[in-house]
Image (cartoon, helix red, strand yellow):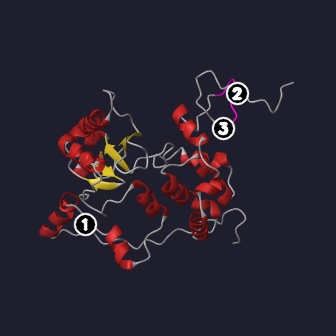
Amino acid sequence: MTNPTAVPEPGPRGAATTHAAAGPDTDVVGIAPDPAAAEGILADAPAEDIFGEDVHTKAKDLISRYPQSRSALLPMLHLVQSVQGYVSQEGIAFCGRQLGLSDAEVSAVATFYTMYKRRPCGEHLVSVCTNTLCAALGGDRIYRTLQEHLGEDGKPLGHEETVGEPGEPGSLTVEHAECLAACDLGPVLQVNYEYFDNQTPEKAVALVDALRAGKKPAPTRGAPLSDFKGAELQLAGFFPEDEATYRGDVDGPSAAVETLRGAALAQDRGWVAPAAQDVPLPTLPPKDGEKK
Ligand code: FES
């Protein structure tokens, strides 16, 4: 008879460190993808030291915005990331406790979306688009150039690796990203999700050098640059209450000439879209348990 409390050996394909049960026939997807990340997780302080009263208040505020508490999970993960610069094991446990979810349920979401980081990020997150169009226009070259420029001892910086001490001023985490939804302005990169359009390797190097030196160059469009944790707080749904500060944080030119080219052409030529037909919506049968 097997001992139910024994920790099984991981599967044969080199499963990484995990808190989930592993068996000889499983190939567990690691919650902590490498020993460095596992070290970071184990080194976490207890949850109450990390997430103070302010974060608890914000968590309650988020939960109150949804009919079901579990719907608040995505902003909650951004909230914990705004504190630690990543989603740690303690962050996962915090979200689970607040929302009545298991750690496994929270982990499943946190590890699915690339915006939730499993290792501490730098002051800034630099995302270089290497998807098809940007790659063809030079995105791959930009990414390689930054990897080599920011690497140390001849070793290029890897995907989601950080130069400098995570969270400290001037530290940068660099990643390659899939389409950043600005193909008409490629090759693009983002810093803390703000756009820098029409990049070249030279422009990108000048940008990361400025960030390393503590400067915050203005993005091509959108809000002024803050830092990764500040951007995460806004993604969680928290903005300054003072209107002027709020406007200063979020306002900025949002449309590019290239993006509006079609609309401008249509306007010049007097083209208009055909009027939408007023089609009545079909009546759906009631769902199980719903009254007719
Ligand atoms: S391919 Fe880079 S923004 Fe779409």
The foreground one among 159 and 257 is 159
Find the distance from the CA under tag 3 to the CA under tag 1. 45 Å
Quadrant showing the C terminus: bottom right
Q: Residue at x 59, y 68 (%)?
A: 57
Quadrant showing the N terminus: top right
Q: In the figure, is residue 71 to the left or right of 196? A: right
Where 163 sits versus 215, above or below? above
Residue 163: image tag: none
Magenta span:
21-26
Residue 23: image tag: 2
Find the distance from the CA under tag 2 to the CA under tag 3. 12 Å
Mark closer to the observer (2, 3) = 3
Where 74 sits versus 209, above or below? below
Residue 60 falls in which quadrant of the image?
Answer: bottom right
Q: Amino acid at mark 2?
A: Gly
Mark closer to the observer (3, 1) = 3
Q: Residue at x 59, y 28 (%)?
A: 15
Q: In the figure, is residue 12 to the left or right of 140? A: right
Q: Tell me residue 33's x, y (percent).
A: 53, 34
Q: In the figure, is residue 59 to the left or right of 82? A: right
User: Residue beneath label 1, please?
Assistant: 253
Q: Are marks 1 and 2 in contact (CB under 8 Å)?
A: no
User: Residue beneath label 3, please?
Assistant: 19
Q: In the figure, is residue 282 to the left or right of 98? A: left
Q: Are marks 2 and 3 in contact (CB under 8 Å)?
A: no
Provide the secondary structure element on which disc 3 rests: loop
Disc 1 beta carbon < 8 A from ligand 1? Answer: no
